[in-house]
Amino acid sequence: MAIAAEPTTTTSIERSLSPADRTLIGLLVISTFVVIFNETVMSLALPRLMSDLNVSAATGQWLTTGFLLTMAVVIPATGFIMERFTVRQVFVAAMGLFSTGTLIAAVAPGFAVLLVGRVVQAAGTGVMIPLLMTTAMSLVAPSARGRIMGVISIVISVAPAIGPTVSGLVLSRLSWRWLFLVVLPIALLSLALGAWKVRNVTTPRRAHLDVLSLLLSAAGFGGLIYGLSSLGEGSGHASPWIPVLVGVVALALFVRRQRALQHGRGPLMDLRVFAHRSFTVSVLVMIAGFMSLFGALILLPIYLQSVHGMSTLAAGLLVLPGGLAMGALSPIVGRLYDRFGPRPLVLPGTVVLSAALWLLATAGPSTSTALVVLFHVMLTSALALMLTPLMTSALAGLPPSRYGHGSAVISTLQQVAGAAGTALFVTVLSRTTASGLADGADTVTATADGVQAAFVWGGVISLAAVAASLLVRGAPDGGRVPVH
């Protein structure tokens, strides 16, 4: 990929980018926001879908988990895709898939077709994230990367955070099909503008796609997430652990295959990025953060509607302040990263994240909704402090030739973490609620206990994030990586 030379003095993103570069990144940011928004748009619709389509909560959450899982399967191949095709070709194909999936979901006659639509949507979405990250890291000078990654953080974290709010607004007046009918014209407009304005900044070359690696990746991530999600069905049998075991074995073989291909035709995913300490530590902390984010995004609407008896509109509006807080903080955090580096931001961010999750674990039927909103704002603000510095320092520590593989690894593990977090939180919720009902508790109390138990697990995970954040250091040369 063509990489812009860093100017002698860079005081803003505008000075480091040409007008054409700014147009390209702007279109990628807007389009990626549109597709990522759909990761969580179904979370608030889950109770409605459970009733309309006659499915359980554990089955219904596959509309979110399946979306994340598909991206985790697609993203490992994006390194090959971006080497083999031009930016314009990749963009048009990705937005075309997303638009097609949106149309399928909008007209779906039942749950199975709706899930197919979500999978097709996700196939396009999975390509857009690494395309945006790699293009930005390649074109933006090191001294301005914190700011541009702050903007990208809005796309990756704020877009799914406001999904439940928009969902609530739509569902207060219209059926769940309008969640897709509203997005479809926006997606088509983005596709048209991109086909017109997106320019090529890369020179395609012949690249090898290792089919075995792709199959192992799909089996590995698919087995893990399917097994975790199956636990939410409440089955007491050992069968859900079989796909988990298959997933672990497949991922072990996938890693072995990638190491072997490093000395031959080239790996599907270059795992040598983990040889860079800053990359590995940043990714570990991000995993905990995304598990918490997506777990909270699916739990809070259930809590607000089932425990406090709120409408979908009211529940959606109550989670809006958290999304707005994250959006407002992300660009500021990007500027602070450019000045101070990652550790002064990541360490307090993980501490606040942990505190927010433990506080949410105390929320019950009598808890004030104002307190719940405050706890949620704490959680999203903490993630804003964490994500921009972590993504920037992770990629800044890599040589430019591995930006594509680094962004693919980050994006894959983000989606797997989100899917695992969703599956874990729903599993704990379902099992604890079922146990409470079996013991004679009323529905409200049993559901509240299930939500609390799920957030306790989130709190435990957050403690690992706090410990890992102590290892975060600045990238070499103050975050600057030589640009060739």
Image (spheres, rainbow, N blue to C red):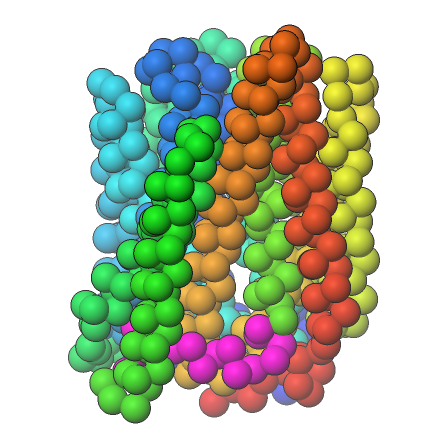
Q: Is residue 162 left or right of residue 100?
A: right
- Residue at figure coordinates x 65%, y 28% from the top left: 451
Residue 261, compared with residue 221, is above or below; it is: below
- Determine the main secondary structure of the stretch shown in magenta: helix
Residue 78 in the image: state x and y as whole percent. 32, 64
Q: Quadrant of residue 447?
A: top right
Q: Is residue 89 magenta?
A: no
Q: Quadrant of residue 227?
A: top left
Q: Is residue 462 left or right of residue 301?
A: right
Q: Is residue 279 magenta?
A: yes
Q: Quadrant of the N terminus?
A: bottom left
Q: Nearer the viewer, residue 385 or 234?
A: 234
Q: Nearer the viewer, residue 97 or 461?
A: 461
Q: How many marks?
A: 0
Residue 2, compared with residue 378, is above or below; it is: below
Residue 292, compared with residue 260, is above or below; it is: above
